Image: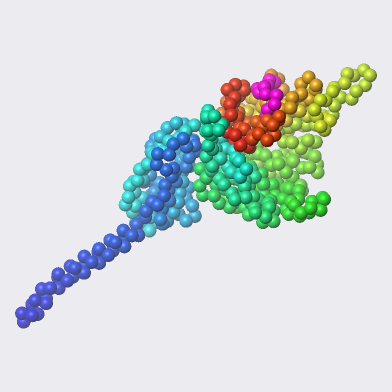
Amino acid sequence: MSLLRRRQRSRWPAVLAVVLVTVLGGLAIVAFLARPVLVDSAPAHDAAGLSTRALVRLAFNQPMNPESVAAAVVIDPPTEGAWEWDASGQSAHFLPAAPWPEHITITVSLNGGQAANGIPVLERRRWAFGVGGERVLFLYGLDAVIASVEADSRLPLDKVEPDVLVREPNGILEFDVSPAGGTIVYAASRPEGGADLKLVNIDGSDPRLLLACPEESCRRPVFAPNGDRIAFERQSRGLDAAGNLGFGEPHVEVLDLAAGSPLALSAAAGQTRDPNWSSSGQLVVYDPGRQAFIVLDRQLGSPTYVPALSGQFGDISPDGRTLIFPEIYAPITTTSTISTVTLYASPYNFFSRLEQVDLATNATLNLSGDAVVEDTAPLYAPDGQWLVFARRGLTTSTWTPGRQLWRMRPDGTGAVAITNDPIGYHSGVRWSPDGTRLVYMRTDSADPSRAPEIWICNADGSDAHAIVSGGFGPEWLP
């Protein structure tokens, strides 16, 4: 064998080694570039004063293996809950089974995980955020955004800066919070009129269209108590009684979130409005044609009809047995033997009392007694042991320009005023989830130009204080 051939043969191992190193290096570069990367996370590191329902969110650059990510995330203190992934498989949020404890720091660590194709996550990430106190959601400002403030805020109103969660270019009409506190459903105004239903996470992330309503208006959405369905009003565009173009009379439908399709109420066909759920799963709607409330069971059947001239809903007791609402009464007729009841301020020449109806027997109880009053908006406490409602006296000795909040037992006993503010008009009251506090809206009857305020007080009316100006429609964050 020649010397040249021996030299060429001796070079092959070196050449092969170079080629192998090059190929392996190229594969390593490809693998590195193809690796899954955490591109975004929330809440932001060192964020403070967040909601007790704040969501931990992760976003990757490619579809992930959900089980591997869940196993690789450590939350301290340890918290029960579930990861929910979007359709792409790239983004997820952690929904705690219960609210975070108030005023603590949560630490989140990502220690691995895999992409859907099996490539591991190489980086390690650790961040922390602070949880504040209980919060209240509301519509805020002329733009009608959904915002929140901490319920225990004691800042002067001119120093309060609400956290804006949801903003729509044409405004938001109404909203409701899911019973678990993870999502908000809201009616988003369309530019040409009407409204669509949208869903968003409780921290304002991942807004998505829930139900498009072109040439219609879908409004007043309310979650069922287990969060699987949403009742709402649908109005079609057309001519009203005066011949003007607008939206016609509403009818209530129910949207099954799993199925994604709305269902008309066959047991309450025709014009219906003002859907409300009881905590035990019944659905109540008002039928203007029948002048009655229709109470449907959990399967949206077996209708029970409760006559009501006022058409103003109140509440259903937590056990689902009684319906309470304000009903219209006419003034006492004046005769030579009956003293006259002088109505001082009623522009409609009637007054309203609270009626309680037993849904099994139709027995009716007048909770307001013989008082000549304007009683409205009754609401059961979560445990059913109290009612809160709004009252204005209508005689010359009891009338005030404002409407006060009262509390009484469900049988009508123990009625006592819990606000004493003759100028203040109080409305939109809501019990806190534990039944210890109330949130409500206050407007100034003497100065309509003054922005409405949201107030909080204890259940007996003590420690009343404003938490924000310019808000309306308050709701507690569950």
Q: Foreground: 144 or 368? A: 144
Seen from the viewer's position, the closer of residues 436 and 119 is 436
- Which quarter of the image is occupied by the C terminus? top right
Which residue appears at 72% of the width and 22% of the height? 412
Q: Is residue 328 visible?
A: yes
The answer to whether one can see residue 98 in this image is no
| Camera-side residue of 189 and 320 | 189
Residue 431 horizontal/vertical position (percent) = 61, 30
Q: Quadrant of residue 174?
A: top right
Residue 177: percent from left, percent from top: 58, 40
Residue drawn at x 17%, y 71% is 15
- Percent x, y of residue 212: 63, 54
In the shown orientation, is residue 220 left or right of residue 397? left
Residue 417 lies in the magenta-colored region: yes
Segment colored magenta: 415-426
Count numbered badges in the picture: 0
Residue lying at 54% horizontally and 49% vertically, measured from the top left? 207
Left or right of residue 206, residue 373 in this image: right
- Tell me: residue 465, above or below residue 188: above
Q: Position of residue 205 (x, y in %)?
A: 50, 47
